[in-house]
């Protein structure tokens, strides 16, 4: 009888821990979304102000950067903008095209739009001054983006 009681108690403790972990994971997911396929994808990125990137793009070419801006995901316009006004005015001079890690399932779904569209977010990826997005209109691109945070 004591064995059954002991194993029942262990089972309850184990299940409680699992549910607690699930609850915490959901809370974390609402705050941060990491788009990384494996740990080798993640790199240490240099935090860069958006205005600094626009003023000195060659300094950050082909480097992993962390950038904060206003995200837009719509037809032919998947970009990070310096400000909300730049989005409204379609000011591509203050915008960076965004390419997500193609291996991640969220990169090809509407999930990004639903979660982050028109939000101030932080992203991490490789800045490429030579890739200028749709019709070459943007001030470079952030490719292989693997991290997003609201």
Image (tube, helix red, strand yellow):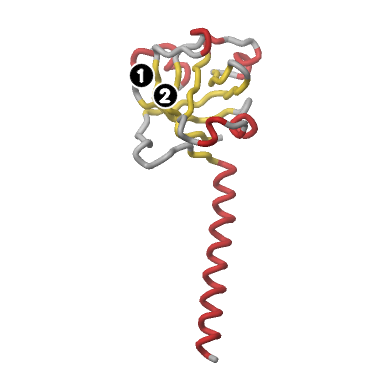
Give the left or right position of residue 118, taking residue 6 as reference. Answer: right
- Relative image position of residue 126 (x, y in whole percent): 39, 24
Answer yes or no: do the residues labelled 2 and 1 have beta carbons within 8 Å? yes
Q: Is residue 112 above or below residue 21?
A: above
Q: Residue at x 50, y 18 (%)?
A: 97
Instruction: Point out residue 66 in the picture as x, y percentages from the top left corner.
Output: 43, 28
The residue at the point 53 percent across, 40 percent down is 32
Q: Residue at x 51, y 80 (%)?
A: 7
In the picture, the disc for residue 113 is none
Task: Tell me the number on the disc at residue 48.
Answer: 2
Q: Secondary structure at mark 1?
A: helix
Q: Position of residue 17 (x, y in %)?
A: 53, 65
Q: Report the residue at 43% width, 14% height from top.
A: 131
The N terminus lies in which quarter of the figure? bottom right
Query: Badge 1: few (under 14), some or many (20 or more) residues near its Cα, within 10 Å?
Result: some
User: Which residue is tagged 1?
Assistant: 60
């Amino acid at each position: 009888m004591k064995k059954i009681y002991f194993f029942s108690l262990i089972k309850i403790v184990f299940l409680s821990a699992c549910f607690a972990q699930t609850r915490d994971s959901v809370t974390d997911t609402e705050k941060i979304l990491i788009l990384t396929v494996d740990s080798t994808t993640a790199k240490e990125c240099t935090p860069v102000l958006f205005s600094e990137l626009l003023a000195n793009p060659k300094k950050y070419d082909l480097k992993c950067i962390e950038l904060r801006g206003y995200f837009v995901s719509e037809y032919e316009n998947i970009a990070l903008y310096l400000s909300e006004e730049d989005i409204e005015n379609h000011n591509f001079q203050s915008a960076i095209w965004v390419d997500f890690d193609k291996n991640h399932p969220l990169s090809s779904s509407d999930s990004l739009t639903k979660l982050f569209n028109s939000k101030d977010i932080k992203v991490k990826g490789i800045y490429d001054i030579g890739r200028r997005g749709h019709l070459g209109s943007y001030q470079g691109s952030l490719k292989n983006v693997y991290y997003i945070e609201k």
